[in-house]
Image (cartoon, grey):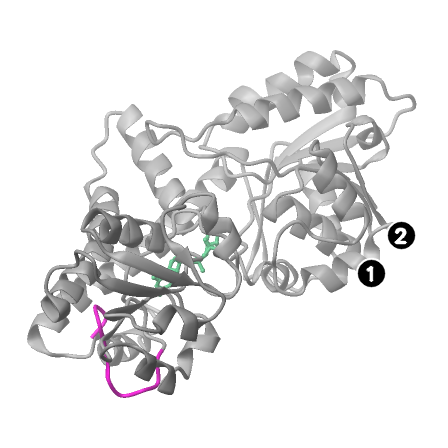
Amino acid sequence: MKISVVGGGYVGLVSAVCFAELGHSVDLIEIDRAKCDAINAGQPPIYEVGLEERLSAHAGRNLHAYVEYDHIKYSDIIFICVGTPQGPDGHPDISNIISASESIGRALRDKDGTRYHVVVVKSTVPPGTTERQVIPSVLRQFGKNNDQIGFAVNPEFLREGMAVWDFLNPDRIVIGCRKKMDGDLVEAAYSGINAPVIRTGIMAAEMIKYASNAFLATKISYANEIGNICKKLGIDVYEVMRAVGLDRRIGPAFLNAGIGFGGSCLPKDVSALIALAEDMGEDPILLKSVMQINKLQPLRLIDLLIKRVGHLNGKKIAVLGLSFKENTDDVRESRSIVVIKELIRRGARVAAYDPKANQSMKRFLTEIDYCSSASEALTGADACLVMTEWPEFAHLDKEFDLMKSRIVIEGRRILSCNDREGICW
Ligand code: UDX
């Protein structure tokens, strides 16, 4: 099959590489020339496990990146994978989607021949967006016989750091469409992947993405609330949640208490669902509580720190882990940002180290010291906060002797040495 992917970010690049891995001929449209060149040279502009080797195997063979949209006219399927960042009022900003839709419509108008195309929204958009905005934007520019074009929604459920694996081993493939043949074409793009395919209408497919992410966020905030109660009682919440998760009706995943959820999806998607509900006159009290718990959770780490070291003014605090979770250099909505800002506000000096994310964090925080190893950050520190579950932090022990005193507080359970404490205890 001939497939185009519009947008070379996390979702678009991973999807393009994985469709190439499945044997399709893939054109990736990325309007940023530098990113486009890097992709064609086999160098992913982002860090993602397993991506670089797969990209270098396919770049220049069955995967080509272009800055112009022209090439999509040769494609059977065009996946829209552009970002929908959170706007100031919680609603996602869908301007990238609209301009991509218009560019797709224009590029398809110039085509010759009778090739049928399906335009597929993979970006996360509020229910109703594809019907009310994407389809009209494409068709307005296309301006030809609408029988030659179809539409579908095919949300992604890719975890950063696991995105390649998740793409190739999904729990389910969701395809929403109006016409059966459009869904059949999209389904054919995934042939070779063994997973249940759920066929729905367009709006239901859009909603499935939000409902899934909001439920995952709810599980985390629930675990954090139980963890906060456990902590007061001296109970290990991990022991509790391990047993709770063995109930098949509940399931073990996403019950790890700690400093809460970050990243480019969960906070944005829950906020978008709240905004959507409020637009319709609903008061989504559960979802609002999920966000409120998530907002307060990182500050509990600061409370614990102050209990141990007193005031923070002039104290050196080592922060281990900047990315919003392990195996990624992404710092978007990272809990470390909230915690470090609070440390700075209270006069602390911050020495930070992350195996991959020092560079990305420099864009958000300039007033801290970036270290090239955990040992460097720990040397002479009054206390240490462990923020991310990077495997290399798991066995830190003698490195803590480099501190003034061994005060180590975990925001996520990762350490194996004995003298740890944290909000998840
Ligand atoms: C998420 C969804 O999992 C994915 O399906 C969707 O398409 C995109 O958003 P991602 O943002 O990459 O993926 O990260 P995820 O692994 O879901 O973790 C999100 C946040 O929750 C991280 O900050 C993580 O550390 C935190 N988390 C996760 C917990 O605090 N506890 C848990 O038990 C699990």
Residue under the point 70% across and 21% down: 103
Q: Is 390 above or below relative to 220?
A: below
Q: Position of residue 192 (x, y in %)?
A: 74, 61
Mark 1 belongs to which amino acid? Ala
Q: Mark 1 to mark 2: distance in Å?
A: 8 Å
- Disc 2: CA contacts within 10 A as few (<14), some (14-19) or many (>=20): few
Helix, strand or loop for disc 1: helix
Helix, strand or loop for disc 2: loop
Q: Which SS does the magenta portion mostly show?
A: loop
58 displayed left or right of 165 = right
Marks 1,2: beta carbons within 8 A = yes
Q: Position of residue 162 (x, y in %)?
A: 56, 63
Residue highlighted by disc 2: 61
Picture quadrant of residue 288: top left
Q: Is 146 above or below relative to 355?
A: above
Q: Position of residue 125 (x, y in %)?
A: 49, 34
Mark 1 sits near ligand 1, with its Cβ under 8 Å away: no
Residue under the point 61% across and 17% down: 136
User: Magenta region: which residues?
Assistant: 415-425
Residue 157 colored magenta? no
Picture quadrant of residue 299: bottom left
333 displayed left or right of 23 = left
Mark 2 belongs to which amino acid? Arg
Q: Position of residue 293 (x, y in %)?
A: 21, 52
- Disc 1: CA contacts within 10 A as few (<14), some (14-19) or many (>=20): some
Residue highlighted by disc 1: 57
- Tell me the quarter of the image containing the C terminus: bottom left
In depth, the one of 101 and 115 nearer the eye is 101
